[in-house]
Amino acid sequence: MKRRLLLLVVFLTSVFSAGCAPQQSYYFGNYSQTLYASEKYQNEEAYVKHQQELERVIYESEVRNLPIPPGICAELGYINLKGNNSKEAIRLFQLETQLYPESKHLMERLIQSANAKESTDSNVSNSSTSNDSVSK
C-alpha cells in the first residue's frame, strides 16, 4: 500500500513538474554570436551575416508563433536605413512600434530621419537626371 502511494506521488510530481517547464518566449537564433562577430571583425562579411541573422530571427519567430524579440526590427531597420533602403527601414520601424509601443518615440524619430533621407535621395537623383537632360 505504501509503495503504491509512493509511486503515485512520484508519478504525479513528475507530471506536474513537467508542466511547469519554462516555455521559450523569444527566438534569438545566433543573434549574439553574429553581433559579436560584426563588432569584433567590423568587415562586410560579418555585417552581412548579422543582417541575415536578424532576418532569420524575424522569420523563425513567425514560423514558431513566437513574438519577435524587442529591438530586432529596429536594428534591422537601422541597417536598412544605413544601406539606403529607406522604405524597408520605415516598414521595420513601424513593425517595432506595433510590437513594442514603448519604442514609439524613438521609432518616430527614426522614421522622420528615413523620410528625410528618402526625400534627399530622390532630390539628388532628380537633379542628376535633369542635369543629364540639360547637358544633352
Image (spheres, rainbow, N blue to C red):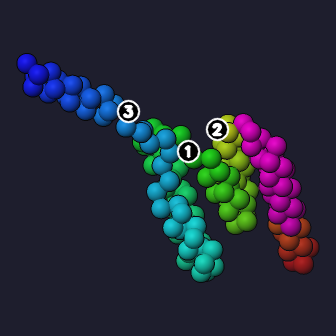
Q: Which residue is mark 3?
A: 20
Residue contact between numbered discs 1 and 3, judged by CB atoms under 8 Å: no
Q: Which residue is mark 2?
A: 99
- As helix, strand or loop, the secondary structure at mark 3 comes to loop
Residue contact between numbered discs 2 and 1, judged by CB atoms under 8 Å: yes
Dominant SS in magenta: helix
Residue found 53% across the figure and 49% down from its top: 58
Q: Which residue is mark 1?
A: 68
CA gap, disc 2 to disc 1? 8 Å
- As helix, strand or loop, the secondary structure at mark 2 comes to helix
Residue found 67% across the figure and 44% down from its top: 96
Residue count near mark 1 (Cα–Cα under 10 Å), binned few <14, some 14–19, many ≥20: many
Comparing labels 1 and 3, the label whose residue is closer to the camera: 3
Residue that lies at the very extreme toward the front in this rendered image: 2
Determine whether 52 is above or below 132 in the image: above
Whether residue 119 is visible to the viewer of this picture, yes or no, is: no
Magenta region: which residues?
101-124
Residue found 46% across the figure and 57% down from its top: 29
